Amino acid sequence: MLYDAYEIQRSMLAGASAMANFSAGLLNNPANPFSYFGGGPIVASALEVFAHASAPRGKPHFGLDHTEIDGKQVDVHEEIVLRKPFGQLKRFVRSGVEGGPKLLIVAPMSGHYATLLRGTVERMLPVADVYITDWRDAKQAPLSDGRFDLDDYIDYLVEFLAHIGAEGDPRPHMLAVCQPSVPCYAAAALMSADKHPNRPATLTMMGGPIDTREAPTAVNTLATERPHSWFEQNVIATIPVTYAGAGRKVYPGFLQLAGFMTMNLGSHMISHWEMFKHLVQGDDDSAEATMSFYEEYRSVCDMTAEFYLQTITTVFQAHALPKREMMHRGRLVDPSAITDIAILAIEGERDDISGIGQTKAALTISDKLPEAMKQYHLAEGVGHYGIFNGSKWRTRIAPVVEQWIAAHSG
């Protein structure tokens, strides 16, 4: 019923959005005298804001067709190098460029598409052979594709790293952005215990919930205040027949988006008010920047119910990894197995999703790793999304990641 109600609302808003967009176009038409005076520009701007906010959205594109290396423009194209039922391994191929550290960027499976990390990929392209986990929207996965939980997520990471690290090549590097920090650490520990030849040379974790007992945020508190059964009964929905994944139980992306928007409702309202003013003033460039952000931010995907519920229990309620109790298919995930993977933990001073100390905890539990292979970086004045996107990521955080990878390559 929850998903059906959402689909009805979405269909209604899609029609209203199309009408608002059409009306705004009429009011902005130079041939229309109302576009020059009176309330025409104001009404048109209001209609544009509404049309953008209520428009239906699908999976965005990365749109990265070039990068710059040593002052020269280099063409870039995407290549899917490995397909799995719930995700694919995507490579950004730099034409004519050979060598360089191989970097697996692990995108969060938390309601948004991998394209949320467009800025992360773009910044690392000049210095690395970049791969990314491109997770599938669960509502598009038929029931015949089976289940996908936290154990499967870890299996995918191991398989992706093995695929990237061809025999004889230097070991690959792994960058976990937010949510995947725990499964990435688990994959690194399991591969270390197995002496896997393609275990990562470095593991960088940014804003990740390794130990949510440290400086708990509103997100962490919500997870601990309610039992597992509450989440199962209140936020899990069934995909309707209109999608390929009909009948699959999921945690809907629209619920995750609603939660994120509510956390910073004032900021989002101000952003839309500013966008409205920019449109009225004819400042299309400023308005476009805000629109581009929300185009990505509002593009959401679903997670399988089993992955979501297992993550809530393992990461946020049981704190299994920092307690050294995390299991993977009946096998203990042992942090002490990590002895030669250089770990970089990055946190944002103003992160309201993963509090200060939560990612740093990875350094503490890695008790067999030499101190020279551990580093912590606190990004002052940076919030959750600023860790991996925007000017502060490009100029202050990415150089730290770049230097860490360079220092532990080869």
Image: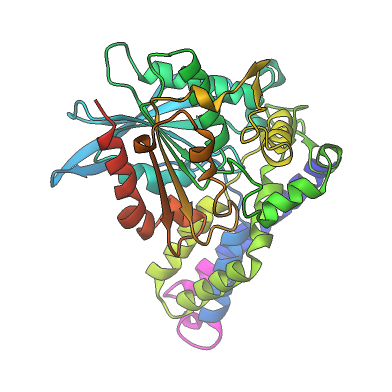
**In this rendering, is residue 291 above or below 270?**
above
Residue 242 appears in the figure: no
Please tell me which residue is depicted at 73% across the width and 52% down the height of the picture. Answer: 221
316 left or right, relative to 28: right
Q: How many marks?
A: 0
Please tell me which residue is depicted at 33% across the width and 14% down the height of the picture. Answer: 166
Q: Residue 127: horizontal and vertical position, in percent? A: 25, 39
**In this rendering, is residue 33 above or below 347?**
below
Image quarter for residue 163?
A: top left
Image quarter for residue 161?
A: top left
Q: Which residue is at the far bottom?
A: 38
Q: Which residue is at the far left?
A: 71
Task: Locate the C terminus by quadrant.
Answer: top left
172 left or right, relative to 141: left
Q: Start and end of the magenta stretch?
A: 23-40
**In this rendering, is residue 34 above or below 51?**
below
Image quarter for residue 249?
A: top right
In front here: 301 or 409?
Answer: 409
Colouring mode (rainbow / by chain / secondary structure / one colour): rainbow
Please tell me which residue is depicted at 48% across the width and 87% down the height of the picture. Answer: 37
Task: Locate the N terminus by quadrant.
Answer: top right
Q: Residue 42: horizontal and vertical position, in percent? A: 54, 80
Q: Residue 158: horizontal and vertical position, in percent? A: 49, 20
As for residue 33 lying within the magenta part, the answer is yes
Q: Residue 157: horizontal and vertical position, in percent? A: 50, 24
As for residue 392 lying within the magenta part, the answer is no
